[in-house]
Image (tube, rainbow, N blue to C red):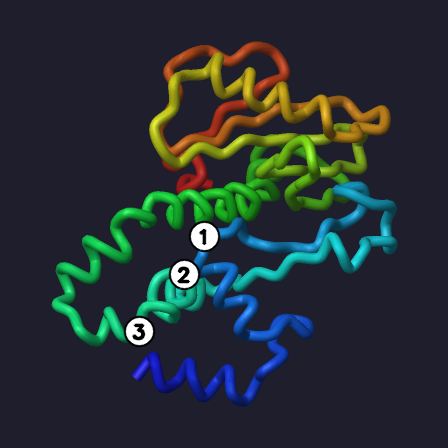
Amino acid sequence: MLASWSARFWAANPRFLGGAPARLCSNRLATGKPPNSTPNGPWRTAPGRASRKLTRYAISDPLLRFWFRFIASNLSLVRAGPPQRVFETLIQPSLEGFYGQGFERLCREALPCLYYAEGVTGKFVVGEFWGPEAQIDVVGLRADGWTDLGECKWGQTKGLEPMLRELSAKTVHYPLRGATLQKRLFTRRPLKSVPPTGVRLHDLKDLYAL
């Protein structure tokens, strides 16, 4: 039923997602390329001047993301079955990466709730940063003069220090433009180390508790 619904949907909406051909969206997700977006504000360009070359497309619905990531390009294999073999050969090897992309989305969606819990007031914008030198999973631009830059790790981590070094290497490529930097590390499981000043730690349980 889902297969027939999907075929009808894309037939009726051949230029869904702001003019991106459905085939392009399907191919990008099926090949495991990173989720796409358009940079807002100073992510990459000045406000209102985002280049079309910097525009990437993403599917926000989790079910459709799963469909085009694992199923759409493998329909013949899925139909042939059996289900256990399909899962073990087509889905399981890339499932943790799929979860990781979802975790990054969750962290960005949780940042406004973290702001509220921390007593942050004023306007803010949440997104991500990507450029030739670095990609930063979570970016929060705040009207109070602070900028939050965050790294998300769904899988196993080597501890606080390696994660912090990785994030610090990326933040040097971000245009802070005079803002005060707040670093945030998001992990599936809690980090046991005590973070230094200017670093906040958040694990999956913390996000669910918001």
The amino acid sitting under disc 3 is: Leu
Q: Which mark is residue 75?
A: 3
Coordinates of residue 122 in the picture (x, y in percent): 76, 40
Q: Nearer the viewer, residue 78 or 182?
A: 78
> Disc 2 marks which residue?
69
Residue at image point 39% right, 66% down? 63
Q: Would residue 130 be found to the left or right of residue 65 on screen? A: right
Q: Earlier in the sequence, mark 2 or mark 1?
A: 1
In the rendered image, residue 135, in percent from the top left (x then y), is placed at: 62, 36
Asked if the residues shown at circle 2 and circle 1 are in contact, with their CB atoms under 8 angstroms apart, the answer is yes
Q: Residue at x 32, y 68 (%)?
A: 74
Badge 1 amino acid: Gly
Lateral position of residue 69 relative to residue 130, left or right: left
**Along the line of sight, which residue is nearer the eye, 145 or 151?**
151
Q: Position of residue 97 (x, y in %)?
A: 39, 45
Q: Looking at the rendered structure, which numbered label has been put on residue 32?
A: 1
Dot 2: what SS? helix
Question: Which numbered disc flags the more N-terminal residue, 3 or 1?
Answer: 1
Which badge, 3 or 2, comes first in the chain's sequence? 2
Closer to us: 138 or 18: 18
- Tell me the element at label 3: helix
Between circles 3 and 2, the one closer to the viewer is: 3
Determine whether 172 is above or below 101 in the image.
above
Q: Is residue 130 above or below residue 156?
A: below
